[in-house]
Each structure stands twice: as C-alpha cells, then as structure tokens.
Amino acid sequence: ETGVTQSPTHLIKTRGQQVTLRCSSQSGHNTVSWYQQALGQGPQFIFQYYREEENGRGNFPPRFSGLQFPNYSSELNVNALELDDSALYLCASSPLSQRGEQFFGPGTRLTVL
Amino acid sequence: DQQVKQNSPSLSVQEGRISILNCDYTNSMFDYFLWYKKYPAEGPTFLISISSIKDKNEDGRFTVFLNKSAKHLSLHIVPSQPGDSAVYFCAASVLAGNQFYFGTGTSLTVIP
C-alpha cells in the first residue's frame, strides 16, 4: 500500500511568483487536507477536498486555492507569493470517515525570497 | 488565536521512565483529540486518539487522558524508549467538523 506522497520535496520562489504543490493520496482515501507549518509552529489547516469539491477552509486568503482530481490526488496553488508563505506544506489523506486519523505526506518545503 | 496549546517546547526524560506531554485547549466545542508524532524530514504520524465521551484511552505504552472540565489532555509514555524521541503534536476537532487544530508541538528527547 503506497502512502501519501508529495512533490516537489523543496523549492525556492521569489515574491510575487506563483507555485503549485502536488499530493498523491493513500490508496482508498478520497479526502485530502492541506496544512501550512511555519517554523516552530504546528500545522495550520488550509482547506480540505472531498470528491473533488472544497469541503472546509481555514483562515487563509483566496490566493491559496486547490484542486482534487478524479483519482483523489490534489494540488495546492499559491498566487502572489509573500515572504510569510515560506513554510512546510503538508498534505494529509483520509478515508470516507472524517473523524479518524489523517495520513500525512513528508511535506514540501517552500522558501520565498 | 491558538486554540490548542502545548506550553512545553521541549522535554527530556531518562530511558525507562515516564514521559508526560501536556496539551490545553480553549474551544469547549472540541470533541475529538489526537496525538501525532513527527520525526525530522517526515510527515506527522498518528499515535493515539480520544473522544470526549471518554477520559482515558490506552494503546500499549501510550495512554491519553482527557480532563474536559480543565480543557486539558496529556499523553503518557511508559516506559520511554530512545526511539520515542520526536516532536509530538496534539490536535483537536469539533463534532462533525473536518478541520484539525494543532498545537505547536513538544520535542521529546529520551536519554539512553
């Protein structure tokens, strides 16, 4: 059984640019959540996708957007990058039940210069 | 506004002893709590959970205690092993909610 994978592992962008991060969910999981983890902080919920629809959103501006595909993989897009967007971005997948544990990928380290 | 707080950034414990990690929350609507463990360069991995209808849940060496009146939960690891050295996050969610709120983490070091 393949776990949650994310790509790229890390990348560097400059302020104002746009970035797309990718996530492949664990087999059988149809729900994907994205988190931002700034240095020294816990993961903060960005949004969740369930069956290709956004299913909840945290306190993040609209320049953070996402997609989920029919195979349940997902993308996180961030437009107009700001320095404070530098963080570890974590993707987590879970099965139909939303009350259980989430399975996290290793994350993408984004640095904005 | 941090709704889940872990006030101890780090903890050192001797191998074989008990490790106690603490977590406080402010939202009385939280009804489901989890602990995750994170090693460097890896994503968090689920450790143990507890529902608000319980005050204790045990899984091997790991026990989570929930005190709803104090809005406090703790994770006990007995006996502690060097492989337990990691960052531990507590997380909470609201009934029927899908958003998990995480604390800032406690770095546990188990000294051989």
Image: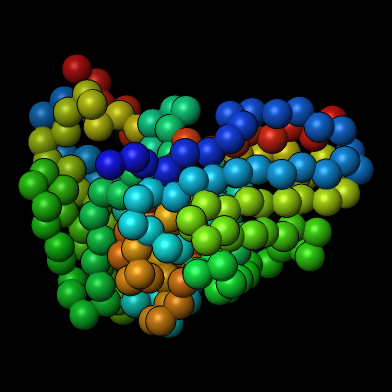
Depth check: A31 or A63 in front? A31
One can see residue A56 in this view: yes
Q: Nearer the viewer, residue B60 or B110?
A: B60
Residue drawn at x 58%, y 29% is: A9
Please provide percent x and percent y for residue A20: 71, 44
* Relative to B108, residue B101 above or below: below
Q: In x, y percent, where is residue B39?
A: 38, 31
In the displayed image of the protein, which residue is found farthest to the right? A16
- Type of colouring: rainbow
Quarter that holds the C terminus of chain A: top right
Residue at (58%, 60%) from the top-left corner?
A: A68
Answer with left or right where residue A29 lies relative to residue A23. left
Please indicate whether residue A58 sits to the left or right of residue A95 in the image: right
**Residue extending farthest top:** B112
Tell me which corner region of the image, top left, top right, bottom left or bottom right, holds residue B49.
bottom left
Apparent side of residue A24 relative to residue A108 in the rendered image (left or right): left
User: What is the x, y in percent for residue A99?
Assistant: 34, 70
Residue A33 placement, left or right of B14:
right
Q: Quadrant of residue A1?
A: top left
- Residue sitting at 63 percent across and 67 percent down? A58
